[in-house]
Amino acid sequence: MKKSKSGSNEGKGGDSASRQIDARIKELSDWRGETLARVRILIKQADPEVVEEWKWRGVPVWEHAGIICTGETYKDKVKLTFVRGASLEDPSGLFNASLEGGTRRAIDFHEGDKIDEKALKALIRAAVTLNTSARANARPVRSWKRPKSG
């Protein structure tokens, strides 16, 4: 798949991840679609360099130097899962799901919930900072060299 600067990637049949996410939002045609669309806008506002992906047979994923979060939809909620959420500060207390895990944290949005847009954008930015700092601090991989035979 070829990624473009616009944050989409061209997949089989010319469908981009962004178009697949658009289609999912339209398909939901209820509060879940509206919530997913709003969260998506906030993610893009918080990180204009975000790349949208479509993975695991239909899950919107937002990446920047690694996965920031996923946007799953269920009958009763929209779940925004931060893959490294346990390593993020959450001063506003947005995380309300997957709290027992050692790595992930999630935010479950239910019908009628108000999104704390400022806090969500701050969380997105913190996740991007974590991803980019982890990549910058990664130890370089040393190539293995065959010992000289004597």
Image: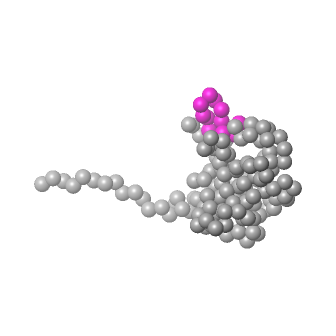
Q: Residue at x 83, y 40 (%)?
A: 29
Taking the view exactly as shown, the residue that stands out farthest to the right is: 112
* x and y, in percent, of residue 20 in the image: 69, 37
Taking the view exactly as shown, the residue that stands out farthest to the left is: 150
Residue nearest the viewer, comparing 113 with 90: 113
Taking the view exactly as shown, the residue that stands out farthest to the top is: 13
Instruction: Give residue 134's quadrant in the image.
Output: bottom right
Is residue 15 highlighted in magenta? yes
Image quarter in which the C terminus is found: bottom left
* x and y, in percent, of residue 4 in the image: 61, 39
Tell whether 76 sits left or right of 16: right
Q: Residue at x 66, y 51 (%)?
A: 70
Q: Which residues are magenta?
A: 8-19
Image quarter in which the N terminus is found: top right
Is residue 99 highlighted in magenta? no
Tell whether 140 sits left or right of 42: left
